[in-house]
Image: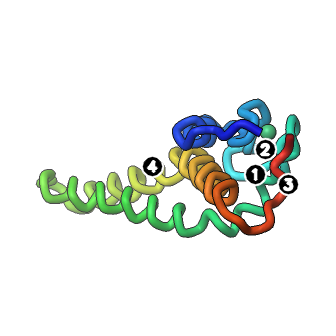
Amino acid sequence: MKQKSLSLILLRGLKGNCPNCGLGKIFKNWFVLNKRCSHCGCEFQSREDDTYFFMYMSTGFLTGLFIVAMFFVFPQDFRFAKLVLLFASVGMFLLTHPFRKGLAIAIDYFIEEKSDYPKRRQGG
Ligand SMILES: [Zn+2]
């Protein structure tokens, strides 16, 4: 089997496509993973536990962006600014969720492909 490049695997994950074949969809809907790829059988749901570190770190990164932004914005009305910050941050986490999760699945797939440990079903 031909080795896929890291950039190809990450791009597929970012687009929500199967990191193995690029054809099947990782997500059933915005938040729920398909059990496996409908095209090649690559498993997605069983990888979810391996994505928490990346999801935690990317959430921390996004939080950091908001903290840095607070150094540059001086609102007149702090109550309104807190509301804007709340909705902007929750919105950012929700809107970026499938992209971050897809990337995390792709990274997990890449690491597993490179490791010597027994592999989950990765399709043909
Ligand atoms: Zn696939």
Q: Which mark identifies residue 28?
A: 2
Cα gap from disc 2 to disc 1, whole angstroms: 5 Å
Which residue is disc 4 drawn over?
Answer: 92
Cα gap from disc 2 to disc 4, whole angstroms: 20 Å
* Tag 2 and tag 1, C-beta contact below 8 Å: yes
Circle 2: residue type:
Lys
Of labels 2 and 3, the one closer to you: 3
Q: Secondary structure at mark 1?
A: loop
Q: Which mark identifies residue 121?
A: 3
In the image shown, does 41 or 102 lie closer to the viewer? 41
Mark 3 C-beta closer than 8 Å to ligand 1: no
The number of numbered discs placed on residues in the rendered structure image is: 4
Of labels 3 and 1, the one closer to you: 3
Along the polypeptide, which appears first: circle 2 or circle 1?
Answer: 2
Along the polypeptide, which appears first: circle 2 or circle 3?
Answer: 2
Specify few, some or many for label 1: CA neighbours under 10 Å numbering under 14, 14-19, or 20 or more.
Answer: many
Q: Secondary structure at mark 4?
A: helix
Specify few, some or many for label 2: CA neighbours under 10 Å numbering under 14, 14-19, or 20 or more.
Answer: few
Q: Which mark identifies residue 33?
A: 1
Quadrant where the C terminus sits is top right
Circle 4: residue type:
Met
Q: Quadrant of residue 119?
A: bottom right
Circle 3: residue type:
Arg
